[in-house]
Amino acid sequence: AQQAWLAARRPDAQDLIQPLMDRLAANATVGATPAGGLCRLALTDADRDARDQLVRWMRELDLQVQVDGIGNIFGTRPGRRHLPPVMTGSHLDTVATGGRLDGQYGVMAGLEVVRWLNARGLQTERPLVVAAFTNEEGVRFQPDMMGSLVHAGGLPLAQALDTLGTDGTRLGDELRRIGYAGALPCGQIVPHAFIELHIEQGPVMEAEGVDIGAVADLQGISWQEFTFIGQSNHAGTTPMHLRRDAGQGAAALAVAVRALAQRHGAPLVATVGALQLQPNLINVIPARATLTVDLRHTDEATLQRAEAELADLVQQLAAQERLEVQTRRLARFEPVHFDLRLVRLIQDSARHRGWKVRTMTSGAGHDAQMMARQCPAAMIFVPSVAGLSHNPREHTAPEDLARGAAVLLDVLLALAEE
Ligand code: HGY
Ligand code: MN
Ligand code: MN
Ligand code: MN
């Protein structure tokens, strides 16, 4: 029955291109950067403006809008029956040097599915929900995927609200300041299934000429911050053997982190993304050095081993440079395996449309990995040009964006009829 229902209704991807591109272009006017990307750190004014625009669009589409205690926004399209809804969604916040598609694409495509159904007066058995989760990127407030993590019960709301940002602000205060401390209890909406549409943000699909990625799993993520503490001193008068140079500790660790990743080999990836020296002056030996290490791997035991090796390295370097060292864990998520039945629905839709589909592992973290704690979940990927993301030059061809939206529509409708 489902297949027949689907076959009778599926739109050509072409039908979706223009409205989707128009919606993405309108969305990209909020928090736009001179480089042509987006800068919408969670709970800033730019994030607020994007949220306000989304709520306006949801209301225009006759969706019932609800906001929960961590600021997650849900737009519900009623179904014929009061059943657990089929949910799709992603995030509106970005890294400071973000592109126009990361997160945005999944939310805007969800709105386009609703618009397509409204235009045809089609009602699904189950309600449909489009979601925008708070603070997926975790740049200003850690951990990342925070809104969906609280929704899925992985982080108590009170603890999340007390999180202090890298700018010293308290998350709960910022949420209230922008007007998105909502009344809906977190986790109240329990979906029948969750599907997230996202750009790959990596080079694999483009290299292999793949149209649709059916994401079956997502690698584990470890975020830590290390602070080396030495002694600031005069750069000219202090002999090398008398120094306690925090900067040397941090620089040595950054080099050692890459060697650790090379020793383990793919798919382990390791990144020193942030590094601050204090007092950061040309003629003063650094007293303190703070750096972050992002480790990821598809296998939990290997990720744990890499973390243990990193901990040993940090201790060795601190001893060698006669430094103290403090460690702060900022996020830790185990690898996630998505629901194979949903993965197959994605594959079926792509194949039925004659497109090349590949089963994939996600290198990036996504809200779907948190939703997988609450209900069956899976992701649809489309290719990223040159594999670029977290970069204003992030780009995906409109035809590819439309293909992803068409597969999303197929899968959501199939799930909404069961
Ligand atoms: O870091 C990540 O992978 C996610 O985009 N926050
Ligand atoms: Mn994203
Ligand atoms: Mn991202
Ligand atoms: Mn992400």
Image (spheres, rainbow, N blue to C red):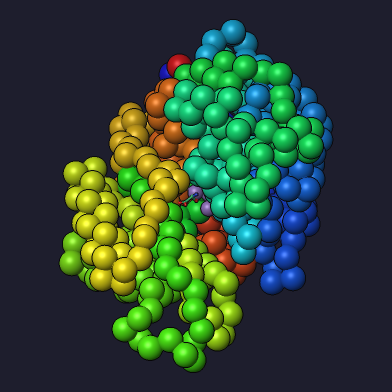
- Viewer-proximal residue, 62 or 74? 74
311 vs 219, nearest the viewer? 311
Q: Give percent across and percent down for residue 192.
A: 47, 19
Residue 63 position, x and y percent, is: 73, 25
Q: Residue furthest top?
A: 82
- Residue at 43% x, 59% y: name it: 227
Q: Is residue 66 left or right of residue 382?
A: right
- In the displayed structure, 289 sits above or below 197; it is below
Please state, as top left, top right, bottom left or bottom right, where the C terminus lies in the image. Answer: top left
Q: Is residue 142 left or right of residue 301?
A: right
Viewer-side residue, 303 vs 291: 291
Q: Is residue 14 visible?
A: no
Compared with 143, 375 (above or below) is above
The number of numbered badges drawn on the structure is 0
Q: Is residue 188 left or right of residue 39?
A: left
Position of the N terminus, as image quadrant, is top left
Give the vertical position of 57 relative to 322 (above or below): above
Q: Residue at x 42, y 37 (%)?
A: 369
- Return the x and y of residue 102 as percentages of the image width and height: 57, 53
Q: Position of residue 238 (x, y in %)?
A: 43, 86
Name the residue at the bottom extreme. 236
Give the quarter of the image for residue 300: top left
Q: At x 58% / y 45%, what residue is drawn?
A: 141
**One can see residue 255 in this view:** yes
